[in-house]
Every structure is written in C-alpha cells, then in structure tokens.
Image (tube, helix red, strand yellow):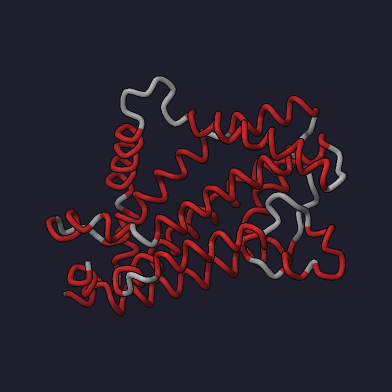
C-alpha cells in the first residue's frame, strides 16, 4: 500500500485540485491582507521596472523602443514567474512540513499549491501586456488562442515537476537552496530576457540551447506577434517530459522518506 501511494502521489496530487487551489488562494489573501490593491502591487512594480529598463536598454542595445518594450515586458514577467518557482521550489516541502507531518495528503498537493499561487500572480500581470499592445498597436499572432494556453499549461506543469525535483533534493540536502539561488541569478543573464539572441551572432547557441529561453519564447512569441519557432516548442515539450519523468522517479524512490528529512 505504501509503494502504491508513492507511485501514484503525483496523479493523486494533481487530481486534488480543489484542495491546492483553495490553499493557493488562501496564501494570496494572507499575503495581501489589509492591502488596498493586493497582488496588483506586483503589477505596478513590474510595470515600473519594464518602463525604466525598457528605455535604458533600448538605448544601449540600439533597438526601437516600440519593438523592445513589449519584448521586455513579456520576457521579464515570465522570467519572474519561472525564477520564483525555482527558488520557492527548493523550500516548498520544508515550508509545508507541519501539514506533511500532520495530514495525510499527496506530497504533490503542496507543490501544486505553490505553483498555483504564483500562477495567479502571473495572471495579474496581464494588464501590462494589454497596455503594451494598445500603446504600440501590436497585433498578436492569430495562433495566440491555441498556443498561448498550451504554453501556459507547459509552464504550469514544468513548475510542478521542478518543484517536486528541487523540493525532494532540498529536503535531503539543505545546501541545494543557496546553490540554486546563485545559479538562478546567473541564468538570468544567460537567458534572453532583456536581450535578443540575434545580438550574439555566432554565439547565439548560448540562448538557443537554453531551455529557459524556449519556455519564455512559447509565451512571448504569440503575444508580441513574432514568428513562432518549432524548435521552441520541441525544446519546451522535451523539457517538460524529461522533468516529469525525473519527478516521478524521485517521488517513487524517496516519497516515504520526506517526512523524516524535513
């Protein structure tokens, strides 16, 4: 019975969406309790950051502000979502130790709670996208209706797989958290968030072999009307499948030890 629970933990956790969705909303309400505009503070701070960096780097990189600002806005918001999932993924099980030890829930529920909470904040940044599109008269690619939800789904699932992987590893090895935090900061400069791969010319492989870039691009390209590259979808799907397999293996192998590690 124990082995069966470990084997099916991810499936049971994903299907318990009523639990982790309610817990995620509760986290949002608690975080912004007694705040007038709540999570829209994130929207305002991101908008200010995009405007400042947009005018600065468009001058440094010598690109048209009308093209660069939407590119930066989408890239920065999606990167903030990804980096937050990575960093919080290292502590998600440690922070949930009370519930894990007291309530018999799938471990995946706690990871889904963290991903859903940050996904809600990501959706609060949609006004920034809409404002940029209206301001510069940009028409999204027609495939946005199909490809954007699919890209968001891949991003959501990848966040769960990464949360499971990092959560289990960090529960066993506490040094994982500072290591991942440092690597995430480095990855920001190696990922085309504020710059385009084209400026690297012969060194564009630095970006094109970066799965984080393709995870951003499947969201950014449909929104800003850029050509949608097939390799970005191949990279994103492969990244999702590989992470899912690793997460399932770790869950089956170490699920029953997590309560003792935390």
Q: Would you identify the image quadrant in which residue 141 lies? A: top right
- Left or right: residue 202 versus residue 2 is right
| Residue 141 visible to the viewer | no
User: Which residue is nearer to you in this view: 218 or 52?
Assistant: 52
Q: Residue 146, relative to residue 89: is it above or below?
A: above
Q: Position of residue 58 (x, y in %)?
A: 80, 41
Q: Position of residue 94 (x, y in %)?
A: 27, 60
Tell me what residue is drawn at x 44 percent, y 31 percent. Answer: 39
- Left or right: residue 171 versus residue 177 is left
Tell me what residue is drawn at x 55 percent, y 29 percent. Answer: 44
- Left or right: residue 81 versus residue 211 is left
Q: Quadrant of the C terminus?
A: bottom left
Q: Position of residue 119 (x, y in %)?
A: 47, 44
**Name of the residue lying farthest toward the top:** 36
Tell me what residue is drawn at x 83 percent, y 48 percent. Answer: 61
**Name of the residue lying farthest toward the left:** 102
Tell me what residue is drawn at x 41 percent, y 50 percent. Answer: 115
User: Which residue is nearer to you in this view: 12 or 70?
Assistant: 70
Q: Position of residue 168 (x, y in %)?
A: 33, 69
User: Which residue is nearer to you in this view: 15 or 19?
Assistant: 19
Q: Quadrant of the N terminus?
A: bottom left
| Residue 38 visible to the viewer | yes
Q: What is the number of callouts on the image?
A: 0
Q: Residue 191, relative to residue 175: is it above or below?
A: above
């Amino acid at each position: 019975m124990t082995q069966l629970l470990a084997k099916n933990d991810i499936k049971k956790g994903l299907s318990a969406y009523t639990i982790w969705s309610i817990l995620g909303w509760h986290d949002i309400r608690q975080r912004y309790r007694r705040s007038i505009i709540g999570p829209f503070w994130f929207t305002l701070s991101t908008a200010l950051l995009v405007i400042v960096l947009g005018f600065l780097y468009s001058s440094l990189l010598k690109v048209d502000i009308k093209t660069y600002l939407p590119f930066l806005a989408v890239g920065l918001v999606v990167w903030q979502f990804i980096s937050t999932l990575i960093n919080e993924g290292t502590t998600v099980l440690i922070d949930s130790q009370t519930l894990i030890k007291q309530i018999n829930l799938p471990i995946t529920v706690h990871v889904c709670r963290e991903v859903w909470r940050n996904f809600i904040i990501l959706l609060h940044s949609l006004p920034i996208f809409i404002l940029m599109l209206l301001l510069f008269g940009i028409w999204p690619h027609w495939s946005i209706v199909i490809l954007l939800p699919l890209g968001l789904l891949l991003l959501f699932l990848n966040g769960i797989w990464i949360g499971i992987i990092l959560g289990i590893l960090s529960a066993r090895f506490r040094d994982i958290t500072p290591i991942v935090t440092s690597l995430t900061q480095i990855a920001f400069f190696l990922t085309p968030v504020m710059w385009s791969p084209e400026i690297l010319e012969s060194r564009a492989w630095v970006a094109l072999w970066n799965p984080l870039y393709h995870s951003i691009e499947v969201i950014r390209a449909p929104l800003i009307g850029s050509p949608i590259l097939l390799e970005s979808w191949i990279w994103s799907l492969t990244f999702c499948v590989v992470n899912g397999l690793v997460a399932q293996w770790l869950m089956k192998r170490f699920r029953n030890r997590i309560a003792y590690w935390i």
